[in-house]
């Protein structure tokens, strides 16, 4: 089964983290990656830039498109990265997620195939 693992964090905590704390985070990511490699495979992953660098595209009711900077909401947490992995089942995905840094809020979401849609 394929899962996307979304990691939310408090940006100020990372900015204020000591080198030791940052190394603990890196070690936790390596533990997650080794676990996934033993039980499945990593499809992709990335760290994301802050929400202040995001661009939002919205379709309006009148058919026009609005492109804005942001979001401009005050967020205590924001998504800071993701892993796209293939693992045998949700229990294995949850076990992998528990290896990620303790300060994260982690969402494990299965991907779905949309009937009738063929990716080009």
Image (cartoon, grey):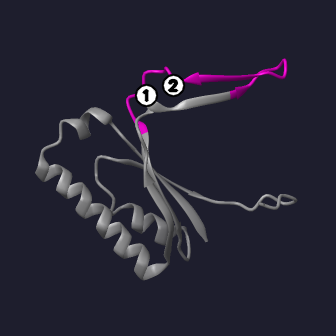
Residue 60 image offset from top left, x and y in percent? 77, 21
Q: Secondary structure at mark 1?
A: helix
User: Are the residues tagged 2 and 1 within 8 Å (C-beta)?
Assistant: yes
Residue 52, numbered circle: 1
Residue visible at 49% across and 75% down in the picture: 41
Q: Earlier in the sequence, mark 2 or mark 1?
A: 1
**In the image as oriented, which residue stretches furthest toward the bottom?**
38
Residue 25 image offset from top left, x and y in percent? 25, 55
Range of the magenta residues?
58-78
Q: How many marks?
A: 2
Q: Is residue 71 magenta?
A: yes
Residue 10 image offset from top left, x and y in percent? 32, 36
Q: Is residue 109 magenta?
A: no
Relative to the observer, which residue lies in front, 2 or 47? 47
**In the image as oriented, which residue stretches furthest toward the top?**
62
- Judge left or right: residue 44 versus residue 112: left
Residue identified by numbered label 2: 70
**In the image as oriented, which residue stretches furthest toward the right?**
116
Find residue 8 and report its image quarter: top left
Residue 47 image offset from top left, x and y in percent? 40, 50
């Amino acid at each position: 089964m394929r899962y996307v693992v979304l990691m939310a964090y408090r940006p100020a905590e990372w900015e204020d983290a000591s080198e030791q704390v940052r190394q603990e985070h890196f070690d936790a990511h390596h533990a997650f990656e080794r676990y996934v490699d033993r039980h499945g495979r990593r499809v992709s992953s990335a760290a994301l830039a802050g929400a202040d660098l995001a661009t939002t595209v919205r379709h309006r009711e009148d058919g026009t498109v609005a492109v804005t900077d942001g979001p401009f909401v005050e967020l205590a947490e924001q998504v800071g990265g993701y892993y796209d992995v293939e693992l045998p089942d949700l229990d294995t995905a949850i076990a992998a997620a528990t290896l990620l840094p303790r300060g994260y809020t982690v969402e494990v979401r299965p991907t779905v195939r949309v009937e009738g849609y063929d990716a080009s």
